[in-house]
Image: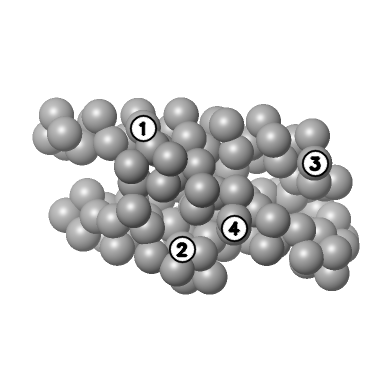
Amino acid sequence: MKKTDKKTENTIRVALTNVCNVALEEVSGFKWITHFVNYDNFPGSLIVVCVFGTKSELSSALIAHHDDFLRTLITSKLRAANIQCKSGLLFVRFDSEETWEPQKYRLH
């Protein structure tokens, strides 16, 4: 990983930590957030995954449109950190700890 990639990685990590702190307070069932990126194709390859405790909690969050709230929050925190990203619908995904398989998000 190049020095600039490490700096960008840290910037993303800090922005998403801020998102996580807000989401833990505001979104019922939300547990944690992670991301995957291939810096050879950045920012186009960035995928952010919001993880809920159970499939039921995830379903409830989607019904309550918390996915829209999270997409907007993620996009705004990344943009505030000068990370330009594609449409929130394309790079933000949702999962549960019950079905979590990180390999389905890994980029090659």
Q: Which residue is mark 1?
A: 11
Secondary-structure class at tag 1: helix
| Disc on the earlier residue, 3 or 2 | 3
Q: Which residue is mark 3?
A: 26
Residue 91: give its label.
Answer: 2
Compared across the picture, whether 24 is left or right of 16 comes to: right
Q: Are marks 4 and 3 in contact (CB under 8 Å)?
A: no
| Disc on the earlier residue, 4 or 2 | 4
> Alpha-carbon neighbours of circle 4 within 10 Å: few (<14), some, or many (≥20)?
many
> Alpha-carbon neighbours of circle 2 within 10 Å: few (<14), some, or many (≥20)?
some
Give amino acid for label 2.
Answer: Phe
Q: Are marks 4 and 2 in contact (CB under 8 Å)?
A: no
Give amino acid for label 4.
Answer: Arg
| Disc on the earlier residue, 1 or 3 | 1
x and y percentages locating residue 93 in the rendered image: 57, 62
- The CA span between labels 1 and 4 is 18 Å
Q: Can you tell which quarter of the image residue 1 is in?
A: top left
Secondary-structure class at tag 4: helix
Is residue 77 depicted above or below 75 in this figure?
Answer: above
Compared across the picture, whether 54 is left or right of 1 comes to: right
- The CA span between labels 1 and 3 is 23 Å
Compared across the picture, whether 28 is left or right of 23 comes to: right
- The CA span between labels 4 and 3 is 14 Å
Name the residue rendered at 53%, 70% in the picture: 89
Which circle, 3 or 2, is nearer the viewer?
3
> Alpha-carbon neighbours of circle 3 within 10 Å: few (<14), some, or many (≥20)?
few
Name the residue rendered at 59%, 58% in the picture: 71
Q: Can you tell which quarter of the image residue 61 is in?
A: bottom right
Residue 71: give its label.
Answer: 4
- The CA span between labels 2 and 1 is 17 Å
- The CA span between labels 3 and 2 is 21 Å
| Disc on the earlier residue, 2 or 1 | 1
